[in-house]
Amino acid sequence: MDSIEKIKTHIEKNFSEKRKKHTYGVANTALELAKQYGCDEYKAELAALFHDLYRSIPVNVLNYHVKHLELDKKYIDNANLSHGKIAAIMIQRDFDISDEDIINAVSYHTTGRPNMSLLEKIIYIADAVEPNRNYPGVDELRRVVKEDLDKAIYMSLSRTIDYVSSEGNYLDKDTIHAKEYFEEIINKGE
């Protein structure tokens, strides 16, 4: 069984209907963006299917993995940040994924980071704009991503920073550095 069939079987057995809908929405969006921007379509679909592998796991189980996998303490009690880091490690163990680009795309799909690969960019923004997402500004992001991938990522990072800050939640430094990185790229292009 190839990796895509293996993860789809896992999704069908273990994901809620809502999580399935989101995951397949991200996969379809990632495929469309991969075609548009010249990214490996197989890797885009695979990374998208893996991105939320640990998203619906109870926080106490995530905390166990954070400790057991010796991840940074900042991930304790933070499902939003820990699920991607845990999934990136577990796909290597449970699905024999060794492609660093796929691993990084899963690991950084929530926070972004400076100097993301094309695949990382596609998974990051596909997660933000897939058709089932509904939040203020998502339609504008969907429009921009069809024209300028980096600009869409910058907009998404900026909105994430504003939202997380307004909620008083922990803001990962990767997100801040990613925003600065993409802001510099966009300013150079103008």
Image (spheres, grey):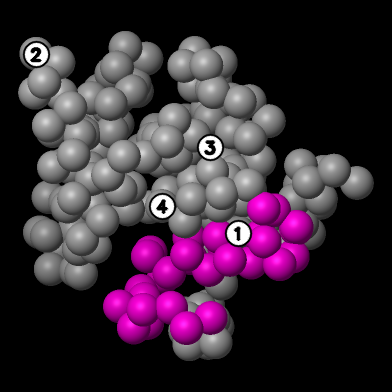
- Nearest-to-viewer mark from 1 and 2: 2
- Nearest-to-viewer mark from 4 and 1: 4
Q: Residues within 10 Å of mark 1 (few under 14, many from 20)?
A: many
The secondary structure type at the circle numbered 4 is: loop
Tags 1 and 2 in contact by the CB under 8 Å rule?
A: no
Is residue 94 a member of the stretch shown in magenta?
Answer: yes
**56 and 68: which is toward the camera:** 68
Q: Which residues make up the magenta segment? A: 69-98
Q: Which residue type does callout 3 highlight?
A: Val
The secondary structure type at the circle numbered 1 is: loop
Quote the CA–CA distance across marks 2 and 4.
27 Å
Residue 161 numbered mark, or none: none
Lateral position of residue 126 relative to residue 11, left or right = left
Q: Residue at x 28, y 26 (%)?
A: 150
Tags 3 and 4 in contact by the CB under 8 Å rule?
A: no
Q: Which residue is mark 1?
A: 53
Quote the CA–CA distance across marks 4 and 1.
13 Å
Q: Which residue is mark 2?
A: 190
Q: Is residue 105 above or below residue 155?
A: below
Quote the CA–CA distance across marks 1 and 2.
38 Å
Q: Name the spot of residue 187 as percent of width and height, x first.
A: 8, 23
Lateral position of residue 147 relative to residue 178, left or right = right
Q: Residues within 10 Å of mark 4 (few under 14, many from 20)?
A: many
Q: Is residue 60 visible?
A: no
